[in-house]
Amino acid sequence: MNASHASHPPDAPPTRREFLTRCGMGMGWLGLAGVAAGAAPAASPLASRAPHFFGRAKRVIHFFLNGGPSHVDTFDPKPMLARHAGRPLPYENLRTERKTGMAFPTPFKFAPHGASGLEISDIFPKLAAHADELAVIRSMYAQVPNHEPSLMLMNCGDSVQSRPSLGSWVTYGLGSENQNLPGFVVLCPGGFPIRDADNWTAGFLPGAFQGTRVDSQHTDLDKLVENIRSRHATAEGQRRQLELLRRLNAEHQQARGPDDRLESRIQSFELAYRMQMEAADAFDITREPAHIRALYGEGVHARQTLIARRLLERGVRFVQLWHGAGQPWDNHDNIEGTHRKLARDLDQPVAALLTDLRQRGLLESTLIVFGGEFGRTPTVELKNDGQSRLGRDHNHYGFSVWMAGAGIRGGMAHGATDEFGFKAQQSPTSVHDLHATILHLLGFDHERFTYRYAGRDFRLTDVAGNVVKEILA
Amino acid sequence: MRWICGVLAGAAALLVSEAAEPDKARPHWAFAPIQKVVPPEVKQSPWVRNPIDRFILARMEAAGLKPAPSAPPHELRRRLHFGLTGLPPAPSATAAAAADAALVDQLLASPHYGERWARHWLDVVRYADSNGLDENAAHANAWRYRDYVVNSFNADKPYSRFLTEQIAGDLLPAAGAPQRHEQITATGFLTLGPKVLAEPDKMKMEMDIIDEQIDTLGRAVLGLTLGCARCHDHKFDPIATAEYYALAGIFKSTRSMASLVTIAKWYEHPLATPQQAQLEEKHRALVEAQKKVIAAFVEKANQQLLVDKAPAPLPAKPEEQYGKDTRDELEGLRARLKQMESGAPRMPSAMGVADGAATNLPVFLRGDHDSPGTVQPRRFPRVLSSGQPLALEGNASGRLELAQWLAGAENPLTARVLVNRVWRWHFGRGIVPTPDNFGLQGEPPTHPELLDWLAGWFVENGSSLKKLNRLIVTSATYQQASAASAESLARDPDNLLYTRAPLRRLEAEALRDAMLEVCGLLDRTVGGTLWEFENYKLVFDHTSKDMTTYETRRRSLYLPVIRNHVFDQFELFDFPNPNMMSGDRAASTVAPQALYLMNSPLVLRAAEALALRLTEAPPQERVAQLYQRVLARPPTPTESARAVAFVARFPGSPGTTVKAAAPAPVWQALAQALLAGNEFIYLR
């Protein structure tokens, strides 16, 4: 059945040359064999790779404020709203998902912070202390005022078609610095956001680049990463067993020809085996000293941010942190109460992360991205009875995303929305532009960073995208 | 359900908005009548087994490609068993056993056929055993609908009848109580959806429930996102808001809820027989009598207390002052009452709908029920009708007419959507790759003539699903090998031309069932419920503690489906979100799945049971037994030699003997490796 194995005793590993001749059939072969032989894996799809050119950023942490945080209440001050409070805007309200009414000034106070004087709302007091490290893009825009397509656009670069996610692209491009953990980890407490795993799908990229989602509401390792421990097998026994499994799977695949799914599945066992060892350590924040834990604070967001730092520190390439299941930031009602609470969830952990990364010398090589799928209207949302419940509707015409860390010029705002904050007006920045910039910081020319699928080359940025040079250090 | 139509409404913002014009869009292929198609002539006609193959081969030949050879019998057998029953072949089947028409008939006649195909349908109707959303109340009677689906598929109920019953079974004549109960239970389809049961705005609650019904019905049956027209004319498909409300009137005239008072309750039909009702009445009388006994006892004891403690008035908590004997006796009486109450005969009932007061709804501008527009007589959308559909009048909701219209042979979408679903469930991709959207935003069919030919054939053959399944699985197209030639890979990389059989991963349920089955642990009982939750009771307490148990050896179909908290093992293997209908499951591959196969209790237990079933024999024979059980084929000499060597060299075990109670770890390890292998989880 398997001619290439005939010259060997059945249980002997194939020669290295045999592996190499089969590389066309699968790049993942050497991974488990390498581990089983105690050597460093050589040709795993997660092996670290060099980008097109030198990139300042080596890893990315993306805080995803799912639901659509309101830019005019957080990072984009609009004093004109107060002047027009309760009156119509001088132009017709842009069409969003629902009806909106009069100008709705922010219930929060903005103040300049740091040497730069960057204005940030008072619901992020601790983060504001890092103002000089942030580059706020105040002129972001998306395509439609609805969650699903906007989530897909922000995560996968296309509102309509199913495409690989940003994290998958980055992991595909750079591999990972740690072969014992997934290269792309998604932490989402308590459930899934809208569109579930589509948000971190590998799409047509090989399955090894798909985000591995962990429910960070748990504190117990066995619940954080299910089935992480073997209750009966010795390490030696399991290694031999997996070696056998690898041979079985390889033969199965050889009889059939190349197939991404079979390849991914072979990879998945190798990774799982290694995760058993490494995950126990990486996910255990009790191994952090008390002062570090105190720095991040209490609660699920503190915990998952600290886990994220431990993952990044161990070489994980891309970590995405979601605020929670569903769409917590989707505040159609009561912006004041809800946004305040949500901001409080994140303020201390994010500020702590910036401090912590700097102290460890990791800030200059870690890119931090912070934002949602769109913003919210500067006008108040109107309910069916014409009344408002002091909330804001979705707004894809203009919103803010900030970045910090590797290669980012801190203490600045780039672009601007109109004087009321409805629409990106000065240096409008598309999601493709944001993606192009992130890829640039990682060392990729987004126009040359492609994957051939179904007969053509695909890019994360499709046929668009310009690097936002102004925010680069 | 706003986010469901998000994609469409959202994308629409990019386009110039204009009102729906049904006639303009009539040319869209999906809305056109089903074409009479003659299967094309092909050169390589000996390959053809039935007309499906002509359509497939003609396209291949036009591209200068050839079909793959037939699949080896053991692979085909495995494919047929899983495809039709969701279970692996019996280990006793030998490698040479035929995978022929007789096997197909045998599998179609198996009671497990209905289970397998019921699970497919349950995806489409967003089946769940709890409500989800804000109040995750138990659907304690949803299982009756599930059994109905299993039985309907096993009985090969014509699809047109199956649909009619699910939409209007309560309005159909019935020959007797069993048939009436069956038809009533079928309407559970309309009420299984998630509902905001604590919605303070009752009108909104009702309109949201109706919207969920329309949305599910539209996508499940017609492949149309009708729900998008709630707030605005459909941006892409010719469905006007007025038509949405004309349709919504039918559901407004239908009773889906028993009570809207928070926490609202969905409607259920009593299914009790007169004898059961009598029994219940008798029991209730007994309970009442016992309550009277207790009241009298307390009264008497209080009187005694007044006498004993006179002149003091009766204390606030008189029972604390009773003597010990009195207290004990009272406790005994109350314990008895509690016991009686918990022993109440459960009156069977089924989730379902009934006709309510016939009402026409106005258009609600922008979906806002406080902004009524013109009243719309109840009628069906125009796009699928020739001419202006008639308004439904009189005291009936119009649901029966709707069901008959949907199930009618002249409706071009119903049959197309169904045959495409069946194709999708066999091949992993529909002829229309978006099985839930046949509208302008859906993808066009890869083989439009085949789709129409199949739809026409299906209608002509009494909309029999068993016949359709037989036709598909006996085609040469289906029976190809999955091994790909270099040419097929190079020139048809995505297998759009079907130049080979697709590789299919077992679904979450099939994986679990197969694992239990090959280990001899599966309980094959068909039907019923495993779930003992009280109806309407919240399935999570305030601590969000999961009180559901999945410890059973029954088929996965019978495990509870809890919204917002799907069984983690299923979620891991892409079980669809039961909050919304889905005809197109994903098949992801991630490391946690591997961890599951390496370390989860179920897999370890299965591997242990499998090892225990091996008979005392030389290692080589035992290896053969193992391969036969797990993969339904003997090992090749290489595989056999490798497994024997693995056993001999496994650490800490001589590996050649087995004790009755505890298998040697090495055999368990070997069994587990086969269970975790790609050959087990992928169908070739």
Image (cartoon, coloured by chain):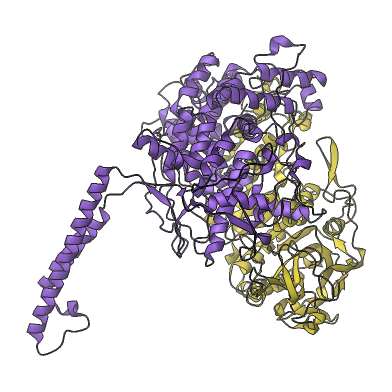
B137 vs B330, left or right, is right
- Chain B display color: purple
Q: Nearer the viewer, residue B490 or B95?
A: B490
Q: Nearer the viewer, residue A90 or B442?
A: A90
Please provide percent x and percent y for residue B572: 58, 46
Residue furthest bottom as drawn: B311
Q: Quadrant of residue A273?
A: top right
Whether residue B262 is visible here, answered yes or no, is yes
B652 vs A17, left or right, is left
Q: Output the letter for the chain in yellow.
A: A
The answer to whether residue B634 is above or below residue A435 is: above
Q: Residue at x 77, y 53 (%)?
A: B12
In which quadrant of the rendered image does the C terminus of chain B lie?
top right
In which quadrant of the rendered image does the N terminus of chain B lie?
bottom right
Please provide percent x and percent y for residue A247: 64, 30
Q: Residue at x 60, y 65 (%)?
A: A285
Residue furthest front as drawn: B394
Whether residue B669 is visible here, answered yes or no, is no
